[in-house]
């Protein structure tokens, strides 16, 4: 079985080596050739030591390195060949342009990969449809967007089974789409089997965002040559805020189905405390990321992706604002309106997870795992003795 797996990986690698590169992929190939000759940035992040294990860069290599890049900007500010030099080496921008191509190429269903080309419009449309759906449902079910449900009971506005059916279907579809896309990326990367040590290292690096420290612990560059850790900190607030909100939903589900304790819950209950903590993280994190994004150096990243990046940050921000507002005024007559608006934003987030910026977390984690596996393997670039 292992021999068959090895042969399959070799077949994928051979087919990939023969696949033509797009213009963006060819630009990464060109820049990596320059970087491989220089190697000044070898200690900055995982991209450069992974680069040194290759003499040429096929499509799979380019996709892998692009998703391993965290767009921290340290290499751009340190590079002697960066614009306006004639070599025009701008690794963060080149990698960003390829990353979005990988999301579109591996998207499932494949036809929906086109949503990445106009992601700002996609987010706006999904948000508008989500808000319209729940506002209309509230009007149909309640006859009004302003009422006084008993004790802030959300299920008095939208029945529990209806919420589970709507969000369960969309969330499961999003998970399946992301899993299929990630598996297609993984098969192309053909990293070989993962040891426990490699999996643990990749998980630890992903959870602490190791490669947003600039390679020296002082942080990355945003608007100028000064190092800062704020981008890493705001990412942490966003990521763990999202996980806490997800945990709040999971604990509430446990309360409902296992402990037979239906909502609403008091403020001191664990689901509510987790939701408050997560909401505050999703408020501070995206607000900080949006502030940094608006002030980043113009050479960082891909300007064409600004709508996707900022739209996703704004969607997270509106999820947190409406969620906290709903909690604050859940006993008021405005609760049905606030609930409908919040659920509309949550639905938009779930529906666009496989076709927007959220995908970068999945592909980057896969790239980190490949790097953890690869760095434990002997390099194939050994100089032969005479």
Image (tube, rainbow, N blue to C red):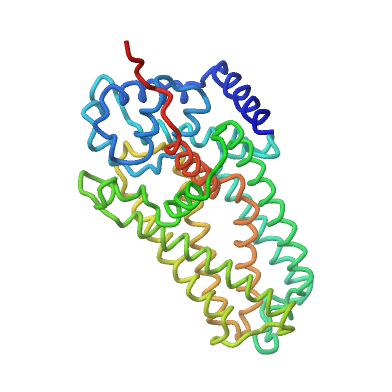
Rendering quarter of residue 106: top right
Q: Residue furthest top?
A: 386
Q: Nearer the viewer, residue 264 or 260?
A: 260
Residue in the image at 61% along x and 19% along y:
15
Q: Nearer the viewer, residue 199 or 355?
A: 199
User: Can the viewer see residue 125 in this picture?
Assistant: yes
Numbered marks: total: 0
> Which residue occupies 60% across, 68% down?
342
The residue depicted at 34 percent of the width and 18 percent of the height is 383
Q: Is residue 168 left or right of residue 189?
A: right
Residue 110 locus on image (x, y percent): 68, 35
Q: In the picture, which quadrant includes the C terminus?
A: top left
Whole-percent x, y for residue 40 in the image: 24, 31
The percent position of residue 328, horizontal first and vertical second, equals 53, 81
Q: Residue 276, image x and y in percent?
A: 50, 76
Image quadrant containing the N terminus: top right
Q: Is residue 385 above or below residue 81?
A: above
Q: Is residue 117 visible?
A: no
- Residue drawn 44% across the image and 67% down it: 281
């Amino acid at each position: 079985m292992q021999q068959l797996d090895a042969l399959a990986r070799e077949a994928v690698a051979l087919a990939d080596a023969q696949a033509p590169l797009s213009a963006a992929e060819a630009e990464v190939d060109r820049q990596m050739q320059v970087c491989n000759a220089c190697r000044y940035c070898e200690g900055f992040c995982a991209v450069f030591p992974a680069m040194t294990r290759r003499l040429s860069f096929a499509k799979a290599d380019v996709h892998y390195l692009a998703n391993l890049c965290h767009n921290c900007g340290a290499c751009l500010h340190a590079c002697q060949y960066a614009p306006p030099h004639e070599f025009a080496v701008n690794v963060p921008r080149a990698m960003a342009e390829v990353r979005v191509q990988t999301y579109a190429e591996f998207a499932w269903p494949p036809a929906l990969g086109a949503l990445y080309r106009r992601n700002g419009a996609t987010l706006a449309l999904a948000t508008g449809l989500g808000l319209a759906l729940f506002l209309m449902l509230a009007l149909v079910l309640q006859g009004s967007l302003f009422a006084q449900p008993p004790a802030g009971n959300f299920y008095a506005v939208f029945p529990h089974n209806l919420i589970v059916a709507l969000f369960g279907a969309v969330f499961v579809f999003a998970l399946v789409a992301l899993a299929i896309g990630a598996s297609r990326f993984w098969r192309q990367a053909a990293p070989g089997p993962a040891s426990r040590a490699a999996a643990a290292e990749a998980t630890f690096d992903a959870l602490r965002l190791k490669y947003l420290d600039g390679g020296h612990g002082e942080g990355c560059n945003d608007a100028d040559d000064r190092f800062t850790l704020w981008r890493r900190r705001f990412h942490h607030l966003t990521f763990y805020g999202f996980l806490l909100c997800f945990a709040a939903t999971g604990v509430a589900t446990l309360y409902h189905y296992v402990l037979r304790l239906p909502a609403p819950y008091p403020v001191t209950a664990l689901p509510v405390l987790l939701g408050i903590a997560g909401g505050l993280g999703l408020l501070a994190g995206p607000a900080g990321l949006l502030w940094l994004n608006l002030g980043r150096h113009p050479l960082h990243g891909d300007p064409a992706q600004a709508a996707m990046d900022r739209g996703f940050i704004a969607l997270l921000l509106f999820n947190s604002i409406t969620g906290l507002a709903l909690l604050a005024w859940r006993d008021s007559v405005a609760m049905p309106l606030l609930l409908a608006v919040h659920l509309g934003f949550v639905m938009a987030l779930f529906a666009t997870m496989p076709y927007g910026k959220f995908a970068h977390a999945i592909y980057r984690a896969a790239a980190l795992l490949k790097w953890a596996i690869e760095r434990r393997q002997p390099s194939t670039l050994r100089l032969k003795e005479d």
